[in-house]
């Protein structure tokens, strides 16, 4: 791009200051909304009773006139034989280092693991990224996760797929870990292998709230539990563990409690976002899932290099992939890796929500030169008349 610098580096202390400022701004904004809307906030440990009331740290009961909504979230899960402690930490602690670690081993290459690996690798940390399955971001479409893996491998990240870490021992200033026939030492091991619902101490058994076999709270389409006027949302219930999913479930629960008409969520249509570099985003079915489920599949796939804005931004390696059903022209999946993928995916999500198919997206005039033209071109490819690509 012709930009010249006289040396460069990272002041990790200022990185941390910026992170804390952003977090404080966001949480402070929520606190402000609570105050503005005259919502009383009580800090403490709460649990529910058989009668549907709430107690907070044993300080007495709060009678809920309309409803109780359980929204306690989740906590990082350890791995079998590998517990948290010492220099074996979870993802939340990994984002809050005071000093930039020289080396990290991250166990789990899903969204959280990929985000951590990408951030620290680009800051200069030597990262080992382990995944038990055959590729990073294994829940994404194969074309997308493979492209993401290639990009991550250029960011100071050594990727080990199809690999199980056998043994982890935390010392005073290093952690040793064994995988296959190899043993290495790193500054920290981060377990990024999923989360478990925070249900301990909520009084669910006493209140009669039923759980599913996987430990999640059982709910219906209006987020109602097995106990009248008790609802559950977010990481406590089925579906992807995503903030925007939890937010919509909260709206659904409140609407139902207020006697309003509401809607059940189509979980497959929720946009999924991974904020590594490059971004990864998706919704709906992967190509493999669509074929397994018997759809008459059409694929529209283009690279960012075929879009003018992709060349301008020097991001030619990105991919936009549309999975469609030929029988009805439906959009049944969208998958993107590249700059602003987490924003671009929303166009396809919106089109499906408004009952538009890939033909309709292909016919909409898009601004030039923009990255959104790539969505249009991928839709044209699915429709059989790709222009650029």
Image (cartoon, rainbow, N blue to C red):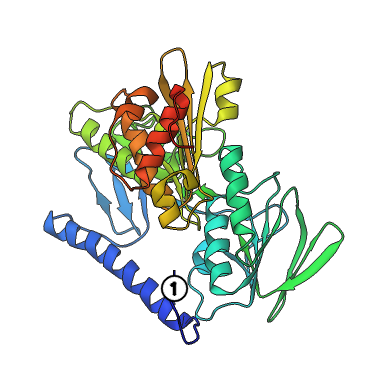
Looking at this view, is 92 or 149 the one in front?
A: 149
User: Disc 1 on helix, strand or loop?
Assistant: loop
| Left or right, residue 268 beside residue 85 | left
Image quadrant holding the N terminus, namely bottom left
Q: Few, some or many C-alpha atoms within 10 Å of disc 1 (few <14, some 14-19, many ≥20)?
A: few
Q: Which residue is mark 1?
A: 2
Residue at 19%, 40% (x, y): give it.
65
* Quarter of the view holding residue 246: top left
| Left or right, residue 222 beside residue 279 | left
In the rendered view, tell whether residue 359 sits above or below residue 180: above
Residue at 23%, 43% (x, y): give it.
64
| Left or right, residue 251 beside residue 128 | left
Q: Position of residue 143 (x, y in %)?
A: 59, 39
* Quarter of the view holding residue 261: top left
- Residue 229 appears in the picture as rendered: yes
In the rendered view, tell whether residue 363 sits above or below residue 94: above
Residue at 46%, 55% (x, y): give it.
275
Looking at this view, is 133 or 188 the one in front?
A: 133
Q: Position of residue 328 (x, y in %)?
A: 41, 14
- Residue 52 appears in the picture as rendered: no
């Amino acid at each position: 791009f012709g930009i010249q610098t006289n040396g460069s580096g990272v002041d990790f202390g200022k990185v941390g200051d910026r992170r804390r400022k952003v977090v404080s701004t966001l949480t402070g904004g929520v606190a402000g909304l609570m105050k503005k809307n005259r919502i009383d906030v009580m800090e403490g440990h709460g649990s529910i009773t058989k009668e549907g009331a709430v107690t907070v740290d044993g300080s007495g009961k709060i009678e809920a006139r309309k409803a109780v909504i359980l929204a306690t979230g989740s906590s990082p899960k350890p791995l079998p034989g590998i517990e948290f402690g010492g220099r074996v930490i979870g993802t939340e602690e990994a984002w809050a280092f005071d000093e930039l670690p020289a080396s990290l081993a991250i166990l789990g290459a899903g969204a959280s693991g990929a985000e951590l690996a990408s951030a620290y690798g680009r800051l200069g940390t030597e990262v080992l990224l382990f995944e038990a399955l055959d590729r990073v971001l294994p829940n994404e479409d194969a074309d997308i996760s493979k492209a993401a893996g290639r990009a991550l491998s250029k960011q100071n990240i050594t990727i080990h797929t199809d690999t199980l870490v056998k043994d982890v021992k935390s010392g005073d200033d290093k952690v040793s870990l064994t995988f296959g026939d190899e043993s290495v030492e790193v500054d920290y091991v981060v377990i990024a292998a999923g989360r478990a619902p925070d249900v301990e101490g909520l009084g669910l058994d006493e209140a009669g709230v039923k759980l599913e076999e996987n430990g999640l709270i059982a709910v219906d389409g209006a987020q109602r539990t097995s106990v009248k006027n008790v609802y559950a949302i977010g990481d406590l219930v089925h579906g992807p563990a995503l903030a925007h999913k939890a937010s919509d479930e909260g709206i659904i629960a409140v609407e139902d409690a207020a006697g309003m008409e509401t809607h059940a969520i189509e979980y497959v249509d929720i946009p999924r976002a991974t904020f590594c570099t490059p971004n990864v985003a998706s919704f709906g079915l992967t190509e493999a899932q669509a074929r397994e489920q018997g759809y008459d599949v059409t694929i529209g796939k283009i690279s960012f290099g075929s879009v003018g804005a992709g060349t301008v931004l020097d991001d030619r390696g990105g991919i936009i992939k549309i999975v469609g059903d030929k029988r009805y022209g439906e959009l049944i999946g969208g998958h993107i890796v590249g700059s602003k993928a987490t924003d671009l995916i929303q166009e396809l999500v919106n089109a499906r929500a408004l009952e538009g198919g890939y033909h309709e997206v292909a016919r909409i005039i898009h601004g030039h030169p923009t990255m959104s033209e790539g969505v249009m071109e991928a839709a044209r490819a699915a429709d059989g008349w790709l222009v650029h690509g």
